[in-house]
Image (cartoon, helix red, strand yellow):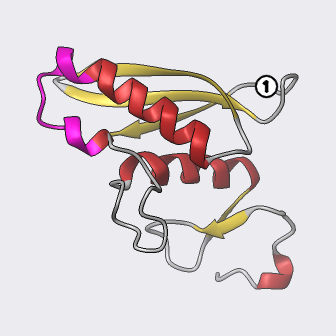
Amino acid sequence: MIPRHQDIRAVYWQPRLGAGGQVVEDLADIAQCIAIILLTPKGSDPHRPEFASDCWKYIDWPVDQAVPHLVREAVLAIERWEPRVILVGVEPVIENARITLRVTWRLAADAAPQVTEVAL
C-alpha cells in the first residue's frame, strides 16, 4: 500500500530506499540518512559537492589500515551532514574481511542511544 501524504504524521520522513511506495519516518529516517551520508561518495551530488563522505576511498585498503580512516571519515561526515543527532561513537565491526560501521547516536543528551549499521 502506498502511503498518502496526508497519512504521514512525522516531521521527518523520506521514501524508503529499495522499497517503492514506502516511507521511513522519525528515527528510521535518521538511520537511513546516516547510511546515505556514509555510502554516497563525496562529489557525486552536483548541487552539494561536499555532501557525503570519503569512506569509498578506503574500500580496497588493507583492513587494519582502512579502519582508522573510515572511522574518521564517518565521524566528520555525520557531524557535518546530520545535525539532528549527537554522535556517540563509530565502531568498526570486521567479519570475513568485510567492514561494517556501527554508528551509535541519539537525538538529545537524555534520549536513548540508537544504533545504525552501514556495511561498506
x and y, in percent, of residue 113 in the image: 71, 25
Q: Is residue 41 left or right of residue 57?
A: right
User: Residue at the spot x=19%, y=14% of the render?
Assistant: 64
x and y, in percent, of residue 18 in the image: 43, 68
In depth, the one of 7 and 62 nearer the eye is 62
x and y, in percent, of residue 39 in the image: 37, 50
In depth, the one of 46 and 37 nearer the eye is 46
Q: Quadrant of residue 65?
A: top left
User: Residue at the spot x=57%, y=53% of the render?
Assistant: 33
Q: Write down the region rendered in magenta.
A: 56-66
Report the residue marked by disc 1.
Answer: 112
**Residue type pointed to by label 1:** Ala
Task: State whether the magenta stretch is mostly helix, strand or loop.
Answer: helix
Q: Quadrant of residue 107?
A: top right
* Residue 93 at least partly seen: yes
Q: Quadrant of residue 98?
A: top left
* Residue 120 at least partly seen: no
Q: Against 56, is 115 above or below? A: above
Q: Is residue 96 left or right of residue 3?
A: left
Q: Against 34, is 19 above or below? A: below
